[in-house]
Amino acid sequence: MDQEETRIYKTYRSFIEQCFGKNAAAGACRGVEVTVEPPVVTLSEILDCYDAFCFDGYGTLYNRGDFVYPGAMEWYRSLRAAGKHLRLVTNAASNTDGFLAVDAAVRGFDFTETETISSGSLLAELTAGKSVGVFDRGPDENGAVNCRCLDREIHQAYYIGRDTGVNVLARAEIAAVEEPCDPVVAVSSYTATAEMFEHAVEILRRPGGLLLVLNPDAWAPKIDGSRSAVSGTLAERLRVTSGCRTCYLGKPFPAIWDKVRESLPEGARVLMIGDTLGTDVYGAQLAGFDSALVVGRNVPAESLQEDEAALNVRPDYYLVPG
């Protein structure tokens, strides 16, 4: 992993430990040991071990445009044929869950809206008064990090992300404007020009400045196998530069996993399949779910052991097509 990427995911872990305690945040619910080498498996080998299968989207099943990763469609079809419960659990905050489900269906993954759970969907719950965000300290909060409700209403925000992301804000009754009456910045992608970055910092430095991180992913894989910084990296630079209070939604933070669990039958045996150690695997451990990592997407094979050691996290399986 890139050094900045590693630092960001370590920061997330630190915030989670401060909110929920080190035992819960370390995945102690299942006692995963990074010293134990996970087995390399195909989906058919573990099919009967689980009732529900959660998939990350980008980097695991598909990528930009109509690109589908080798073996991904076979995974999806075999699980549908076996009558398993499926969930698309994504940090994409580029649109509402309904549109994200349609977007996946265009590629052949026919998830319903109720099977689609995104980080962006948590924003409406946050503004409705639910405690779904992990808040980083602000300059006047004595270093406190906690999970809590918003302490004020938000009506406007300066938005950095894809144009369709305004639908996520609208669902939460937040208008995207250049000069918000509330000192709030919402980030869902890495699309800021230098001018946008400076404007966002100026807003966040105002009294009560709040950064909403709708997509905490720090890095993401491209179709050609390269990787690049995404939303979480931009958000971290804004946070550090401005010293603002920050609210994180999505993986690896616990609220999205609570939403997944509530959508499944009680007692379901759950496997999370993803491409990122710091969000998919670590987050699944927080939830008490097993996890399978698809190596070579967001975690290069050559740095796998080093990355696992750096984050002190390891999946239950390495999943390969077949």
Image: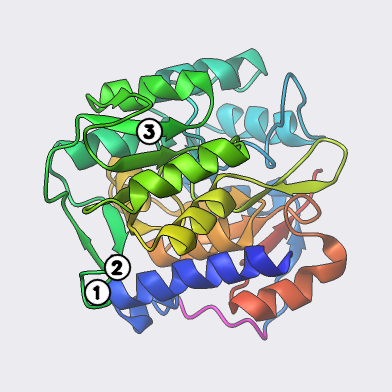
Tell me, what colour scheme is on the image? rainbow
Percent coordinates x, y for residue 183 in the rendering: 27, 42
Q: Please report the residue visible at 42 percent of the width from the left and 75 percent of the height from the top.
A: 14
- What residue range appears in magenta? 30-35
Residue 7 in sight from this viewpoint: yes
Percent coordinates x, y for residue 173 in the rendering: 22, 24
Q: Amino acid at mark 3?
A: Tyr
Q: Secondary structure at mark 1?
A: loop
Q: Please report the residue visible at 28 percent of the width from the left and 68 percent of the height from the top.
A: 139
Helix, strand or loop for the magenta stretch, by majority:
loop
Q: Is 223 in front, or is 73?
A: 223
Q: Is 279 in front, or is 241?
A: 241
Q: Which of the 4 quarters of the picture holds residue 15?
A: bottom left
Residue furthest out toward the bottom: 35
288 relative to 215, above or below: below
Percent coordinates x, y for residue 2 in the rendering: 73, 64
Q: Is 236 in front, or is 140?
A: 140
Mark 1–mark 3 distance (CA, rounded to whole Å): 25 Å
Residue at numbered disc 2: 137
Mark 2–mark 3 distance (CA, rounded to whole Å): 20 Å
Q: Which of the 4 quarters of the picture holds residue 259?
A: top left
11 relative to 42, above or below: below
- The numbered mark at residue 144 is 1
Mark 2–mark 1 distance (CA, rounded to whole Å): 5 Å
Percent coordinates x, y for residue 269 in the rendering: 43, 54
Q: Is residue 207 left or right of residue 43?
A: left
- The numbered mark at residue 158 is 3
68 relative to 54, above or below: above
Q: Secondary structure at mark 2?
A: loop
Circle nearer the viewer, 1 or 3: 3
Circle nearer the viewer, 2 or 3: 3
